[in-house]
Image (cartoon, helix red, strand yellow):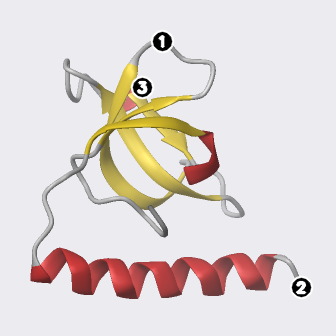
Amino acid sequence: MEGLLPIGTVVLLKNSEKRLMIVGVCQKEVGEKETIWDYAGCLYPEGYLGADKVYLFNNEQIERIYALGYQDEEQFAFKQKIDQIRESIRSQGNE
């Protein structure tokens, strides 16, 4: 799949044994101004267990998609906008 995955998608990261559920997109780490991560995820099936159990990762770290999150017209419109913003941010960082 191209671009960002929808909220609720369950993935397995490379070199991992535990699945994560995507709970946010285009995330920054607290105190970090430079890096914008593609996703924030929580453990699956446990869910959100606190701020110290949120994992930041990028598309290229995903090994397998187990379930795709809910998609409708609103999500498709959001995806189009956020994919453009993400590309703009990444291209500015490479200048």
Query: x%, y% of residue 31?
Result: 61, 50
**Disc 1 marks which residue?**
17
Q: Nearer the viewer, residue 69 or 92?
A: 69
Q: What label does residue 52 carry, if any?
A: 3
Q: Viewer-nearest of labels 2 and 3?
A: 2
Q: Residue at x 51, y 85 (%)?
A: 85
Query: x%, y% of residue 7?
Result: 25, 54
Q: Nearer the viewer, residue 8 or 93?
A: 8
Q: Viewer-nearest of labels 1 and 2?
A: 1
Query: x%, y% of residue 83?
Result: 47, 79
Q: Residue at x 29, y 27 (%)?
A: 50
Q: Is residue 5 above or below residue 8?
A: below
**Disc 2 marks which residue?**
95
Farthest top residue in view: 17
Q: Nearer the viewer, residue 82 or 32?
A: 82
Badge 1 crowding class, 10 Å Cα cut-off, few under 14, some 14 to 19, many 20 or more, is few
Q: Is label 1 in a helix, a strand or a loop?
A: loop
Distance CA(mark 1)–CA(mark 3): 19 Å
Badge 2 crowding class, 10 Å Cα cut-off, few under 14, some 14 to 19, many 20 or more, is few
Q: Viewer-nearest of labels 1 and 3?
A: 1
Q: Is residue 82 above or below residue 52?
A: below
Describe residue 54's horizontal placement relative to residue 87 as left or right. left
Q: Nearer the viewer, residue 37 or 20?
A: 20
Q: Is label 2 in a helix, a strand or a loop?
A: loop
Q: Amino acid at mark 2?
A: Glu
Q: Residue at x 13, y 81 (%)?
A: 74
Q: Is label 3 in a helix, a strand or a loop?
A: helix
Describe residue 61's horizontal placement relative to residue 11 as left or right. right
Distance CA(mark 1)–CA(mark 2): 36 Å
Question: N-terminal of the two: label 2 or label 3?
Answer: 3
Describe residue 86's horizontal placement relative to residue 10 as left or right. right
